[in-house]
Amino acid sequence: MEGIEQWKTEAQQWLQQGIEYAHQIPPTQLYAAVAVLLFTTLLLFTIRLLKRTKSNTIVLSGLSGSGKTVLFYQLRDGSSHQGTVTSMEPNEGTFLLHSESAKAVLTLPFSTSLCPQQKGKIKPVHVVDVPGHSRLRPKLDEFLPQAAGIVFVVDALEFLPNLSAVTEYLYDILTKASVVKRKLPVLICCNKTDKVTAHTKEFIRKQLEKEMCVQFPYILHCPALPRVGPCALDDKEKLRVSRSGVSDADIANDYTLGIPGEVFSFSQCINKVTIGEASGLTGEISQVEEFIRAHVK
Ligand SMILES: Nc1nc2c(ncn2[C@@H]2O[C@H](COP(=O)(O)OP(=O)(O)O)[C@@H](O)[C@H]2O)c(=O)[nH]1
Ligand SMILES: [Mg+2]
């Protein structure tokens, strides 16, 4: 008991001394010190928060057979791993892009692996290759909330026979709340350009934009949707759209695309949609790597 009393009085003395000392300091100095302390705390807190929320996940999506798995191995190992079987589970990994780790090794002639400083400068990328089979597409929703960007792989060789299915899948992605709200950047990657019969990215872009209007005519012909750009459909609007002949499945998504009355173009999307070319098989994947680096820093 006595010990506690003694401790109390000591603490009070210390407090008194502290207050006296604070009184001796000019108020401006005191205010400045408090301001610096607050500012530093706030800065550290913000840096921590930013670091935590900055995602390094890139989602590879697209129909089965478009070349996602080959692209995944090319990004990771710099080879196509031919002969891999169709995966029923998402293929995922966190790694340094092969081309970047190779470059870093070249700059270090006497070392066979990356030194820690070199590794620290290049951020590893978490790449997820989500199987394109329609039964497995819900898997995509698991990864989109943490994604920094989407690479939508299109088979530029067998493009026209798949046009309808490709458009439907792309529409589905571009109207998801997890994509529109977070303005996720999308790269439409026209793959298999090593073959001379592959369609060009310009051709593919135009066909996709045209097909959007064919498959989802309310993008074009529904003046009942007055909002500009992708907009949330409330229940009344969904009913109105479904009465105009569009199936429920088409309007099940949270957002719609395009500007009513205008021909659809990807530039109307709130999120940035770009189009590029690649060949996973031969390793011509620089446009995909540039996209990844632009969004994973
Ligand atoms: N010519 C050519 N074929 C490719 C290319 N990328 C993938 N393929 C072939 O396309 C098929 C499907 O590839 P895969 O990566 O399994 O597609 P996924 O179903 O989207 O994962 C395989 O036979 C690959 O060899 C490419 O860039 N060029
Ligand atoms: Mg695959």
Image (tube, rainbow, N blue to C red):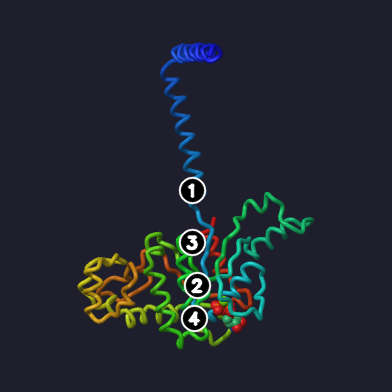
Q: Earlier in the sequence, mark 4 or mark 3?
A: 3
Q: Amino acid at mark 3?
A: Ala
Judge whether 16 appears above or below 167 on screen. Answer: above
| Precedes in sequence: disc 3 or disc 1 | 1
Residue 18 position (above or below residue 215): above
- Which picture quadrant has residue 287? bottom right
Distance, label 2 to label 3, CA atoms, is: 12 Å
Give the residue drawn at x 48%, y 52%: 53
**Mark number, residue 200:** 4
Q: Secondary structure at mark 3?
A: strand
* Image coordinates for residue 57, horizontal then vertical, percent: 53, 61
Residue at 35% across / 73% down in the picture? 265
- Which secondary structure lies at badge 1? helix
* Residue 147: assigned label: 3
Q: Which residue is mark 1?
A: 50
Q: Nearer the viewer, residue 16 or 173?
A: 16
Badge 4 amino acid: Thr
Please state the total of marks drawn on the protein image.
Answer: 4
**Mark 3 nearby-residue class (10 Å; few <14, some 14–19, many ≥20):** many
Residue under label 2, please give it. 61
